Structure formats: C-alpha cells, structure tokens
Amino acid sequence: MNLENLLVVQGGGPTPVLNATLSSILKEASQHRKIGRIFGAKSGVAGIARGEIISLYNLPYAELDQLRMTPGAALGSSRSKPSPTHLDLIVQHLRRLSVRHLLLIGGNGTMRGAEVIGQFCRDAGYDIQVMGIPKTVDNDIAVTDRCPGYASAARYVAQSTRDLGMDIHSLPQPVSIFETMGRDVGWLAAASAAAKLDVDDAPHLVYLPEQPFDTEEFLSDLDRIVARLGWAVVVVSEGLRNASGNLVYETLDPSQVDALKRPLPGGVGQFLAGIVANRLKIRCRTEKPGLLGRSSMLHVSLRDLEDAELVGRAGVRALLAGHSQEMVALRPLEAVGDTGYDLVPLSAVAGKDRPVPAAWLSSTATSVNGAFLEYIRPLIGDLLVYHSHFKPSLEPFGVS
C-alpha cells in the first residue's frame, strides 16, 4: 500500500474552536492506514513556503483532548497571500515531504489560498488533493449555513450584552456602546439581539454594516430611549458604513495595518461615544472586548464545538474518497440528511462574502427580525437568565 502524507494548515484569525477542528483531523487521520505521516505548517500558508513544518503523527489522545479545548491556533496562523515565489517554494516543500493531501482551515482568504495552491500544484505537474475547512467568527463564508467559531463568539456577545445591561441599569451611566468585531458583516453585532427578553432590556439599539448608518437618526433614537429609560446599551459592528459606503470610523495611522495592508478595524465605538457626549451632553462610555470575544473558552457553544469537529472529520474523509478543490459546507440544522454537510467547489466560496441575509434584517431598533433569532438561538444555546430589578412599591411604607 502506498502511504499518502497529510499536511494541515491553520489560517486567518483564531476562534475558540479552531483547535477542536485540528484535534478531530488528527484523530480521524490516525484511524486510516492509507495516511502515512501527518504534518502541520507553522504560521499558516507562509509557514509552508518557509519550510516550517512539524510532525503531528501519533500524538497521545490525552494531548489531542486537551488541544480540543484550547483557544487560539496551536500551529500558529497568518494573513498572507501566496506570491508566485511563495507558491514555487510551497510546491518544493510539498514534494520533499511527499504530501498528497492538504487541509486548510480558515476563512475567506484561506479558501482563496487553497484554491490558488491547488491550481498552482496542478499546473506544476504535482498531484495533490486540497480541501478547505471553514472557520471564522465573522460567519461570512459563502454557501455554508454557519462557520465554526461563529456560534461561540456570538454566545459571548449575547451573554455579555445581557450582563452589560444589568450593570448599566444598576448605576446608569447613562449610555454604553458595545463594539463587536466584524470588518465587513454584522453577524456578531446582530447576535446581541438574542440577549433581549423584554422591550426595555439591552440592547436598545443595534447597528450593522449591512444597513447604512445615519448619525442624526442614531442620536435621535438614542436621545428618545435615554429620555424614557434613563439609560441605554448600544451595540455596533466595527465595520459600520454610511450611505456612501465609507467606514464611519477608520484609523489613519499608517502603522496600524495588518499583513494585507488593511487598516486595523475598530474604534467606531469610541468615535460615536465622543459624538454622543458632544451632541447630547450626556455621559457615554464604550466597551470593546475585541480579541476576548474570540478566545473565551467559557463561552464555547456546544453546537459550535460539534460543528468544528464535524468539519475536521469530514475533510479527512473527503480527501480519502478522492475529493479535491472543495470545501466542507455545513447544512442548516433542520436540513434532512445524515451527514450534516455538503462538499462545495472552492470556486463557489473563495473571495465571496456572506452578509446577514436581507430577509433577516429589519427597521427595528435591533436591526434583525424573528427569522434571525430563530437561526441564532439554537447555535448559541441557552444564556444565563437573571433576576429582574426590583420595582418600586405601589404603596409607600410609613414609619410606625
């Protein structure tokens, strides 16, 4: 039997369940005699080009179980587009190690990288099977119903919004703006709506990149809510855009860019807080958990953990069945079928975003409707429900 070596790559931003996918890949691969050595690339696709490849073969199951519940990217990750020079080096290292199966776990950029690497290898005459495994807290990969990593980060946002509301209501600030991650889409900010049980509960206002942001409307709505309740919690996505399609806030510091030369997102919450203070003359603070929202293991969704392991196993099995240049796409929870996933061409995924569907958006204060809540609630699971604030007595107590 000719053994076929496997290489695993982690790309893009980490999630709480990214290593659960890696763990499931290693467990599944170890059960198939056809697979020979198992390798991992350090620091994403860039690590392959540099030859930074380590052995992951025959790791103890106890270590894999610990890896399963570890946040971050155990192999290290990167945000880099492979250049022609890098692609030449990648093929050289794949040949040297006799890698015939390549699994890339990541988001939109990683799926595009998987497509490019697969095509380059074919053009170079090197026979290799390439499979994409979805991962991103942004939930913006096309075709798949949901992306492993999203449900856990969404659970963090929803629970934190409820917690924040309890705090602000206790000692009115009176306004707190909660800024979530989401450079281009508002899936995470939208998840905050799941925290709301009553009309007066947080969040009171939610803003997504999918809907143009109007500063005057925002101030008017906020002023009205504070006048009625005395406090308010606002949730905004870091990628908010105005009617012209421009970011509401973007850093101009040239040192604050990522590996793809994009300005680092974030800061819109603080920017809007300044406008609220100046225009409405009321106190306004901001909360920006940032990376904490994608690294909290205490907020991991059980559904998310199951999805992360499912796509890992499915990727290995797909490669062994002869599939290539495809991605594992999760089916909707209510879909009929015994696998829970489909295999879709990388060409249908790479370079494509998936915003919150227009049918799930609304003109209400939270920006999403019941259809979105029906989608998100089974993914994030039950949130903690708290005691409501005491109401004033209807009859004042006298002193006897």
Image (tube, helix red, strand yellow):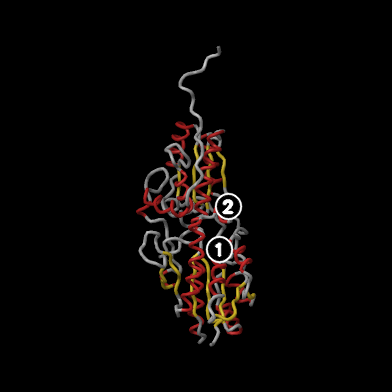
Q: Is residue 166 above or below residue 358?
A: above
In x, y percent, where is residue 80? 57, 69
Q: Secondary structure at mark 1?
A: helix
Image quarter where the C terminus lies is top right
For residue 230, above or below residue 122: above
Separation (CA) of disc 1 from disc 2: 15 Å
Q: Answer few, some or many: residues within 10 Å of disc 2's Cα (few below 14, many 20 plus, some between 14 and 19).
A: few
The residue identified by callout 2 is 298
Estimate how packed mark 1 is, as few (under 14), some (14 to 19) or many (20 or more) residues with alpha carbons within 10 Å: many
* Amino acid on which disc 2 is placed: Leu
Q: Earlier in the sequence, mark 1 or mark 2?
A: 1
Q: Return the mark for residue 18.
A: 1
Q: Quadrant of residue 225?
A: top left
> Given the image, on which type of amino acid does mark 1 rest?
Leu
Quick check: 142 left or right of 274? Answer: left
- Quick check: 15 left or right of 245? right
**Residue nearest the observer in this picture, 291 or 159:** 159
Instruction: Residue at 48% x, 83% y: name it.
Output: 122
